[in-house]
Amino acid sequence: MSPPDDLLARAWAEREEVLYPRLLGALGPGLYPLDAAVFSTVFGQDSVDPRWLTIGVFECPPTPDRPGWAYVSSGLSNPWDDTEAEPDSVSGLGMEFLLQTTERAPWALALVQRFCAYQLLLAAGRMGDHAPLDLWDRMRIGSPIDNADSQLQALVFVAAEHLGDIQTLVSGQFRFLQMLPLTLEEHAFGQQHDFETVVEQLQAHNAAPVVDTRRGSIPLQPPA
């Protein structure tokens, strides 16, 4: 049996020094950690687990193999209390967030940080009976995604299939929960039909998984 801190350190290093560079390339200038203010200002939570403030987001520049910028969380899959190396189990919350944009986007960094905080609060039971975010959850966000004039004002959470469905660390498995912004029309179409169709057609129009906030609604066709 390994000490929890040893397993945590090994999993953390494997994720940030091996797995992420292999999948995403350079991780940018470093981790942008969560700040206590996001918990208090956005969610009204003044009591924060100190471990949460070690979780953050990398801003990954484009590579020859990956167009656009990638904003990826690191730490939600941390095995804080585990002692055994079990590659077939779930590591931490079993997920990390990913958002990809055509251009460098401060709003994207802040948005991923905010959803990291929200996911931690959900997992801790701080947000009532709401379960943590998972595949195919969706929501309107009440304003343009870029806090400016974008028509993208909703989100759906999908698998990052281009990176592989399941990622494995020494501490267990996790998956990327890709944040895919939508217009309100696309969100309504998904509610009426299904969001799998929305995502497939966005991909066909090169509107996913890399997000361009300047785009308008894609003309979607109901499934046959």
Image (cartoon, rainbow, N blue to C red):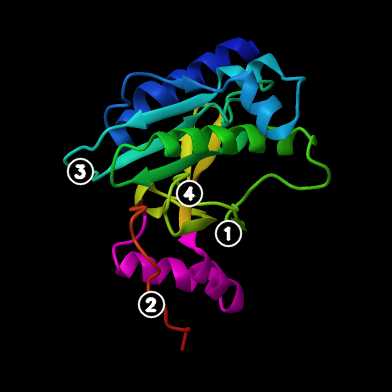
Q: Name the residue under label 4.
A: 145
First in sequence: mark 2 or mark 3?
3
Answer yes or no: do the residues labelled 4 and 3 have beta carbons within 8 Å?
no
First in sequence: mark 3 or mark 1?
3
Q: Is residue 198 above or below residue 144?
A: below
Looking at the rendered structure, the secondary structure element under dot 3 is: loop
Residue with the most extreme right position: 128
Q: Name the residue under label 2.
A: 219
Q: Which residue is drawn at 34% across and 45% down?
A: 101
| Amino acid found under the numbered disc labelled 4 | Ile
| Amino acid found under the numbered disc labelled 3 | Asp
- Alpha carbon separation for disc pair 4 and 3: 26 Å
Q: Which residue is drawn at 38% across and 77% down?
A: 219
Residue with the most extreme front position: 149
Q: Name the residue under label 1.
A: 136
Q: Mark 3 points at which residue?
A: 65
Looking at the rendered structure, the secondary structure element under dot 4 is: loop
Q: Residue at x 42, y 54 (%)?
A: 150
Q: Is residue 175 left or right of residue 164?
A: right
Span shown in magenta: 182-209
| Amino acid found under the numbered disc labelled 1 | Trp
Residue neighbourhood size for the residue with mark 1, other residues' Cα within 10 Å, grouped as few (<14), some (14–19), many (≥20): some
| Amino acid found under the numbered disc labelled 2 | Pro
